[in-house]
Image (tube, grey):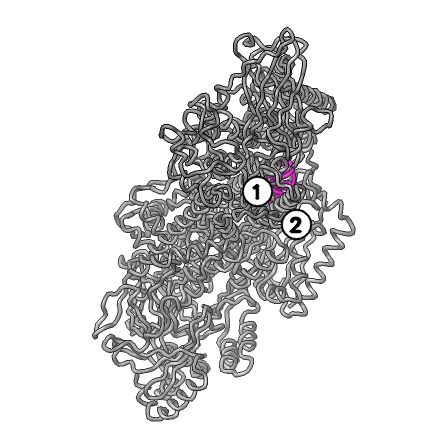
Amino acid sequence: MARDTEDRAAGTHKAERRQRGRSKKKPKETRTVRVHTGHEHNPNRHYANNRIKTTKYTVLSFLPKNLFEQFHRFANVYFVFIALLNFVPVVNAFQPELALAPVVFILSVTAIKDLWEDYRRHRSDTEINHMDCLVYTERRYVERFWKEVQVGDFIRLRCNEILPADVLLLSSSDPDRLCHLETATLDGETNLKQRQVVRSFFDLDCEFDPLKFNGIIECEKPNNDLNRFRGYILHRSGSRDALYKDNLLLRGCTVRNTEEAVGIVIYAGHETKAMLNNNGPRYKRSKLERQMNVHVFWCVVILLLMCLFAAIGHGLWVFQYGDKRPVFDVLSPEGAELSPVVAAVYLFLTLIIVFQVLIPISLFVSIEIVKVCQVFFIHQDQDLYDEDSDSRLQCRALNITEDLGQTQYVFSDKTGTLTENKMVFRRCTVAGVEYSHDANARRLALYQEVDSEEEEVPPPGGSLRRDSSSSQQSSRVVLRSLSTKTHRRTGSRADAKRASILSKHTAFSSPMEKDVTPDPQLLDKVNECGGQMDFMRFHGQPVSQLPSDLADIMDFFMALTVCNTVVVSSPNQPRQKVRMRLESKSPVKTIEDFIKRFTPSRLTSGSSSSSSSSLATSRSSNRGCSGLLSSPSAESTLAKLQEEQAALGSAPPRYDGTPRSPEDGELRYEAESPDEAALVYAARAYKCSLVGRLPDQVTVELPHLGKLSFELLHTLGFDSTRKRMSVVVRHPLTDQITVYTKGADSVIMDLIKPPDTETSKGRRQKKLVLRTQNYLNLYAADGLRTLCIAKKVLSKEQYACWLQRHLEAETAIQGREELLFDSALRLETNLQLLGATGIEDRLQDGVPETIASLRQAGLQIWVLTGDKQETAVNVAYACKLLDPEEEILTLNADSHEACALLLEESLHYIQTKFLCSSSDQAAKAFLPNFAPFEVYPPSSSSPHSAAFTVHRLGLVIDGRTLAYALDQSLEDRFLAVARSCRSVLCCRSTPLQKSTVVKLVRNKLKVMTLAIGDGANDVSMIQVADVGVGISGQEGMQAVMASDFALPRFRYLQKLLLVHGHWSYSRLANMILFFFYKNAMFVALVFWYQFYCGFSGSAMIDQWYLIFFNLMFSAFPQLVTGTLDKDVSAETLQQLPQLYMSGQNSEEYKPYMFWMNMIDAFYQSLVCFFIPYFAYADSDVDVFTWGTPITTLALLTILVHLGIETRTWTWMNCLSISFSVSLFFTVSLCYNASCPSCFSPSNPYWSMQRLLQDPLFYLLCVLTPVAALLPRYFYRACQGTLFPSPVQVGRQLDKLPSETRRNILNLGGVEAGSAVRPVPHFLSLGTPSPEGPDENHQRTEELEFLPLVSWNVFIHIPQPLLCISEMEFRVCVF
Amino acid sequence: MGKEGGCGQNKTMVKQEQELANRPDNTAFTQQRLPAWQPMLSAGIVIPGFVIIGLAFIGIGVALFITSKNIQVMEMDYTGFEPDSDCFKCSNPEEKNCVCQLDFNISSRFEGPVFFYYGLSNYFQNYRRYGVSKDDAQLSGDLDNFKSPSDTCSPYDTDGIKPIVPCGSIANSMFNDTFLLYREVNGTNELVPLDGKGIAWWTDYNVKYRNPNVTPLKEAFEGTVKPLFWPRPAYELDTSDPNNNGFINQDFLVWMRRAALPDFRKLYRRIAQGDYARGLPAGNYSLKIAYNYPVLSFQGRKKVVFSNVSWMGGRNDFLGIAYLVIGSMCVFMSIVMLIVYAKFKFPEED
């Protein structure tokens, strides 16, 4: 504020002019936000307010809008058109009102469904709109609903509050003027983000007063880029303050660790970045439905052909009579004769009405009903229910259940989706000695068990304090139960709503991560070491005399504790940074302070004042989230340092021996990356705890030694190119300047100082390095994330030298990044290896199994992660996505050309290796593992990738390379490479890249894609994919909101796809085919009749039957079958994932099947027509007495047909079929008895009653269905025996007793994850299995009737060849 | 926070009143574990099934075929298409009130009860516009519709001035040939009594078609005209029997029940009275035909049919044959399948 006044005079005029000029020139480029403090009219009222409304309709607009939307569906327009056609007298076929009934029914069913959905949206909107926040009005902060917040309002945010809008941060209670933010709901990252107060409000010491804010904020128009925000505050003084994305708090994020913050609303409601990112789910049409629509179109063509044929026939029929009108001819109402042509045209229209049934009006509604039922069942599945979170699967999209059964590509996020997003310290190696932490492993195993069962540990409300003297075991239990309570949110359900919206759970606080059971051996050593150091200190000996292995251990833990950016906070809410000042000094606020402490004797006032000008810059570079390398020191430090060199040893080590005060309680560590936290927790288990972190100081508590303060000289933050981070500290005990480095093993190992093999120390070092490398390989094979810990001691001169150049680099204007990089490189060389850690990002339960079985099911699995490459690769190995036996193509390129070259090379490599040289062999070697059924030859399994079989190759590509590869010129090549790899891993990919990849694969390969993710960074990918699945786990609701299905755990994907997807697809496919058949069959009956009624469009089937046949009489059984039918049992589907391929290949619904069904329909209708025709030939039967049996026969035939196609009969099926039959007879009996002189033209009075007395009717009812269905039944019987589809084999497996089935499945080597396994080529069915001889004998008999050929197909699984070399193919271009 | 930010949670919350309220119900239905029968189309079921069905069908077929063969039918065309026919002279549309005679001989007794049909060929009573050309309300005796017949009757609703009753094309085109059957007994022609009662559906006669509740019936037809082609108004269709007059005239009712197919027969009379209750004895007969109905203009044919009936109706060999064919096919298929099974089973047993 002070600066404002200074600058005001200077710049007002100019700035205003500029401002005016700009706003005139580009009036729509920016948004201007003026302050609104509640007195006056809001100057920003033309901007959207914070009320959100995601509903589609209002009460008034519902009917027109909904109808309008429904008429977007062509079929509806068609049906309405036909119904309206009935109102035209010359062409009408039915009673107009009657003809309207079906379409009105259909439309209203859909409308009710839409209404219900919209109501649900409305409810959730209301809930969000009515959340509270503090808004500044009338000189104080008042509770307001979210919806009342307006642009320009000042908002006070408290800890753990969710931001109601996009807010510009103006003040924070944090001493560093930061506001910590959890952005999990937005980008899925669980670490805390720091946001900065706008610079001019930085030094505001008193409380921020909105009334004093007098600037105008000029910023971008609302956009959906989460990582961009530009603008400036124009102060009344005329000075400007630039605004960056670091100043903006986004809606949906949660304020953490900051007691209070004040900001001004910049974007509200629908204009917030979160909302702009939240595009409504696009209307998804399932693949099956697209396929179906083609056939609906064909039905239209058939219909038109039929009409045309009949119309021409009618024209000729009329024409043949010429002028001599027959006595039965009816003149037109005007008494004129209709010319043949006019008659034909009229008839054409009439026939469209009569034959309309061919386009199944009820199809769409039936499909929707069936889908809703399917959704219900999926929703109800207990196997998809997660007890821990008391959540079950949610189906958010009602219309793409069957796509679950056709998915070909799965795109998965990694962190939080495959993994728990909980990093757990597993084991470590220090100084070449491996500490296996067996107890820790057991503990983790225990968690796994506990996780899988439901634990109902009553949370003991007692003290949660960690008593350092108590046993680890007991404190662990206490901790775990505490965490059980908070984390699982099962404690207070009454408050659950609040709890989940203002989720109090932190990312890295589960007991699994916090509690590390120390390895006893290592613990002993640490204790010994501590003891010795204590002793030495007591006796004044230099600490450097410590035995080198103990010293390494000490350093190792020091490094774990210090070398990170973990923030320490206390557990009680609101969380606060723990500021543990050991000296009585005031908190360090300035560099001068720091220098003062560094060089207490030489402080000059000049240096203090000289550095004040650079204060702001240094601060911003220090705290900037994106700061590559930061140093809390300033130029002046250097000078001091150089002078101070000699005197250095004198600074007293800061420590005190007091045990940790009870107030400390349980400290919480919040880290940018979860493995940092894991390491800190691990160190704490060895009583080497991080107790405080300040920008320039790290406090560590050690056993025996108490608290030690490390002066933090530099932090060289982690970045993905260096793949390591370092801290430079002054060791309080040795007073040496020590660099602790932690990083990926590949980099650190190269930076290790080459040991001098002459000395014994050097030899020891070399041994250490070799051993460590050995262990590292072991860890990686175990799927652990490995990190190497190294250190380096710098002499003062070295440090000074480095510091000088580093400062130069920091201040450089050009190429600063490179210089800083080089500077870091200079520091991080010649390191001394201390040890390595193995951290487990624990996979979720069942992930490897799920991936294995999904892969067996023919799904290509791609993992797209924002994680760094090493981690991603490690996890990929752990979850069996990558196989140690398969080759890995690693694509890292840093230019477009390099990327092109790489792709070319890879492609070439693949071709030479797999396609040309040993294409057959390789394909065969791989196929059995991939597709044990030989009935799926690779070429037919996916027609698009005929030339591309999938090889035992893994592809790893990083984000930068991906960016090049996704370029239009390279994307085809990239796809060609990627599709031939068995698994693809994209690391460091941005959300946009994720969605681009999915889009690319979906559009170019024309495959069904499924994206699964849990964070907001997956949202775009989830939305782009054909099926989006959200994991409703740790990271907020964003992914779930965007998804079509929300799962509690990743492993449920297996059942969702393999079982429910398969069922849904198979059910719907069969139902749709049946629908086409049914309608064609029914309509064809009328068509045949045209040949006997002069093509006059008359129907022997009563119009009621014609109209309601579909809607009522034949509707229920197929709905029941479509909902309940199970072609194969859930168990078999899961045990034989290969069965899933039938859906992928659309085997249940192929175009030829449609035509076969049509042909069958025409055949059956011929039978149903001509058997009564001949049976009633030469009789005095009248039209409807003849037509009613035909209707009945058609109904029976259709139902029996359905019966043949029904694979699983339950009482529901039987009930529905008998219901259908009895409904038909009941309705027709009532209808035929209701009105003697109504229902022209049929006047069916007493027809049915008379028919039921006619033996001929019953004879027809027996004969006709049998005759009509004989071919189909014969085909089915032969097919089931001679050439059964895999699904049928699966069904036959179901029939076997469970023992036998298990044996077969095991023999078949199809168990998940066990690809390599000796397999007998044939299973001798004659041999009874050892158990239960009696039963088995009987079973064997039965087996003989089973199609034996199929066994051959099924069991003939050649052994996978293990000849593929294990050479690692790495192409790295830097 | 998404636009539906609270939606999922919201739903969860409501259900969380009880512990683990979200747990799905564990019922056989919701878990899709209903006890089910999976019909497997395997040889064990298919072959015996086919054999049984086939044999049963063959049995039924034989029975039907025999029954059908026992039914006697005699058809005679009297269109007068051929010049040597007695009715040739009447086939000229110009000829009015023409009577022709058809002589025939029955060699053996025609078992009774004998049904006497007239048949028309190439006559489309099922023509759509013909079928709707009537007024059901009028035919059920509604006097309002006498005055203003329904549009559906158009253009046979009025003669331009007066409404036509019964209106519509069906009524207008009513078959109006009449027959008298004589049997030559001892050189003289003895009239065979023809029973015209009960030839229409009982419900048509008693429920569906109603004369207006006016006596005498003629008054109800005041102000209306007879259909164009009719020689007499509706109330004079049968002057002898007032219960067979107007809309409930049996011949009218039979005609109004439109035939399903273009070649049809309609029951004219039954021969079941007196000496003829047991059928028509062998001998010479002559049929006197009042030839009124023109059919040659549209290549139609007229015929008379004498037939007796069994429990399954008139003579129809088709159904029996159909049963036999389908039954044989079933048996045949089961044999085919047996061969297939046998063939594919052997290599496996090695």
C-beta proximity under 8 Å, tags 2 and 1: no
Q: Magenta residues, as a range? A: A1138-1162
Dot 1, how many residues are within 10 Å of its Cα: few (below 14), some (14-19), or many (20+)? many
Residue A325: horizontal and vertical position, in percent? 62, 41
Q: Quadrant of the N terminus of chain A?
A: bottom left
Left or right of residue A520: residue A1128: right
Q: Amino acid at mark 2?
A: Glu
Image position of A800 with respect to B251: above or below: below
Is residue A698 something that shows in the picture? no
Looking at the image, which is closer to me, B38 or A1275? A1275
- Label the magenta part by its dominant secondary structure: helix
Residue A1238: horizontal and vertical position, in percent? 42, 35
Q: Which residue: 42% across, 23% down?
A: B242
Q: Amino acid at mark 1?
A: Ser
Q: Is residue A1146 magenta?
A: yes
Numbered label attached to residue A853: 1
